[in-house]
Image: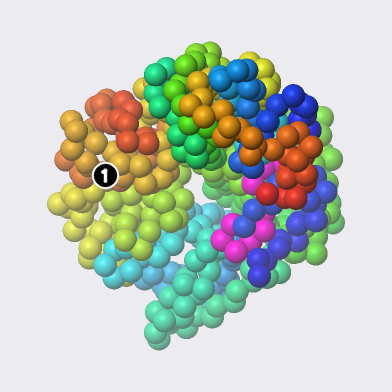
């Protein structure tokens, strides 16, 4: 049976259209994807991300354990910092992509994809070895609400008053009114914003408080549809699309998640790929005329198949079809023309820089 | 929900306006409301053959691709040239400016099995 987040009834009463997503009943949209997308780009959007899973990793070896399983080098990570990383198999294939939060020196939180919760948990346990480390899955009691968009800071400040909010990629543990929360200056939309974690029991109150605080600033609740079109415009990977068991982060063109000066599970393969070049790479492209690329559509160069679309959408901001594709490495570079096969017809497309839309929040 | 009396309907949420042996086809108010923002419409060309039950056009929202099935067999004798530039007309005026294709029917008796407005309304309420 599909699971419900603590905010399910809120979504229903707000008119959210509920769909099954990774075993969770979540709203795909409340009004339209374009309205919600545009609100987030121009004002602010509120997202229920309660389906994502949170693991605590504690113990005197927590840091060295995570260094050994995560691809990213977390040596530079101070307490109060959050970092994007991947978890890899020995062969370099991606188990999951995740966010690591350093709560204290020996105390971390991993935020992982709902669909990969069990796979990740089993992998961590399997690789515990002699590390003195303990795991706790706190997903069932943890809610996550994202507020994203240029107005999100001023909306949140209506509830937090004089509290100094964290800078990008930092987080604080603090109360929002009476609610204990982790307030993280991170997100998945390419806009300034916050990801807020709290106890499930407080989720409805926090959700309502935020909506009320932002109602005159254009804040609207947003569904998974806008979340997806926003992340594609921002060039962010989604597990199951740009990253899979079979795709390494080097192939997915996110080398920044690879620690080059450390060994970790999968490092042999991905270090080798960095050195000699991977046989496949992820590109971003825009359809030149009309047409919307979708996952699995074939990508051609000069009439020959070079790969497949991993994610595609109509971009509400650019008002054209955009997508990402995994292609043979040496075939194309930025500025080249390719074709995307849509219903058996080739549509001209241009290889462009990823992301389509650069991060628009300030750095502070 | 708007379901004009004078039109015929399919269970797949297409409407037909029948004038002699030519019918005009589009998608219903119910269909456009479910799709929400229509951002792309692909139409056949005049002269193409339409076959009952086969895809005659495609409409896409930000998230989804939906086929429009031809309810009848015949020849495409007109397409709404404005739609590719203004796909939002499907949302704004599904029974008017949002029309898609005109087909000259080979066998107008094919339309006898289609739903009338009352039957179509019941079909929508049944949740399909």
Observer-nearest residue: A343 or A121?
A343
Q: Chain of mark 1?
A: A
Q: Is residue A202 left or right of residue A117?
A: right
Compare residues A23 and A141 and report the one nearer the observer: A23
Given residues A126 and B125, the one toward you in this image is B125
Q: Is residue A176 above or below residue A298?
A: below
The structure's colour scheme is: rainbow
Regarding residue A225, the answer to whether it shows in the image is yes
Residue at 71% x, 61% y is A5
Q: Secondary structure at mark 1?
A: strand
Residue B127 point in image, percent of width and height: 72, 50
Task: Give x and y (percent) for residue A196.
Answer: 68, 52
Q: Check disc 1 and report the residue beneath it.
A: A307
Query: Is residue A72 left or right of B121 when viewed as pictured?
Result: left
Can you give x and y, in whole percent of width and height, for residue B47 in the image?
A: 39, 19
Q: Does the magenta segment cover residue A131?
A: no
**Residue at point 61%, 41% (across, down):** B12
State which quadrant residue A129 falls in. Answer: bottom left
Q: Is residue A23 located in the magenta-colored stretch of the structure?
A: yes
User: Which quarter of the figure is the N terminus of chain B placed in?
Assistant: top right
Q: Position of residue B7 (x, y in %)?
A: 70, 26
Q: Which residues are magenta?
A: A21-35
* Direction bottom: furthest residue: A130
Name the residue located 26 percent from the left edge and 44 percent from the top edge: A307
């Amino acid at each position: 049976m599909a699971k419900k987040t603590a905010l399910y009834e809120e979504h229903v009463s707000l008119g959210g259209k509920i769909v099954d997503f990774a075993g969770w009943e979540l709203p795909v949209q409340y009004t339209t994807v374009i309205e919600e997308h545009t609100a987030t780009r121009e004002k602010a959007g509120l997202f229920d991300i309660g389906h994502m899973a949170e693991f605590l990793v504690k113990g005197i070896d927590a840091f060295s354990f995570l260094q050994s399983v995560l691809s990213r080098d977390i040596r530079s990570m101070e307490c109060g910092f959050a970092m994007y990383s991947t978890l890899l198999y020995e062969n370099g294939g991606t188990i999951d992509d995740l966010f690591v939060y350093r709560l204290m020196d020996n105390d971390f939180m991993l935020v992982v994809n709902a669909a990969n919760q069990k796979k990740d948990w089993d992998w961590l346990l399997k690789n515990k070895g002699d590390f003195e480390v303990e795991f706790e899955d706190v997903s069932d009691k943890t809610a996550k609400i994202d507020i994203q968009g240029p107005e999100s800071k001023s909306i949140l400040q209506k509830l937090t008053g004089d509290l100094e909010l964290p800078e990008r990629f930092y987080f604080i543990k603090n109360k929002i009114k009476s609610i204990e929360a982790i307030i993280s200056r991170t997100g998945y939309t390419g806009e300034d914003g916050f990801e807020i974690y709290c106890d499930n029991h407080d989720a409805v109150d926090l959700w309502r408080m935020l909506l009320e605080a932002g109602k005159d600033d254009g804040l609207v609740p947003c569904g998974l549809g806008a979340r997806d079109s926003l992340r594609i415009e921002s060039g962010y990977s989604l597990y199951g699309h740009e990253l899979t068991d079979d795709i390494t982060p080097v192939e997915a063109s996110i080398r920044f998640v690879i620690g080059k000066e450390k060994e970790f599970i999968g490092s042999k393969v991905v270090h080798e790929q960095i050195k000699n070049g991977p046989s496949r790479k992820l590109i971003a492209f825009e359809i030149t005329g009309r047409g919307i690329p979708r996952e699995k559509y074939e990508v051609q160069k000069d009439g020959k198949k070079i790969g497949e679309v991993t994610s595609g959408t109509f971009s509400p901001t650019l008002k054209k079809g955009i997508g990402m594709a995994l292609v043979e490495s040496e075939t194309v570079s930025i500025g080249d023309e390719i074709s995307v096969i849509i219903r058996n017809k080739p549509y001209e497309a241009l290889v462009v820089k990823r992301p389509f839309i650069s991060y628009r929040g300030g750095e502070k | 929900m708007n379901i004009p009396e004078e039109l015929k309907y399919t269970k797949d949420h297409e409407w037909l306006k029948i004038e002699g042996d030519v019918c005009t086809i589009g998608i219903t108010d119910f269909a456009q409301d479910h799709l929400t923002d229509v951002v792309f419409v692909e139409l056949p060309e005049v002269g193409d053959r339409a076959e009952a039950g086969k895809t005659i056009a495609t409409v896409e929202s930000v998230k989804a691709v939906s086929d429009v099935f031809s309810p009848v067999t015949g020849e495409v004798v007109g397409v709404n040239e404005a739609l590719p530039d203004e796909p939002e007309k499907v949302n704004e005026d599904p029974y008017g400016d949002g029309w898609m294709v005109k087909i000259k029917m080979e066998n107008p008796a094919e339309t006898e099995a289609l739903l009338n407005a009352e039957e179509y309304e019941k079909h929508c309420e049944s949740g399909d």
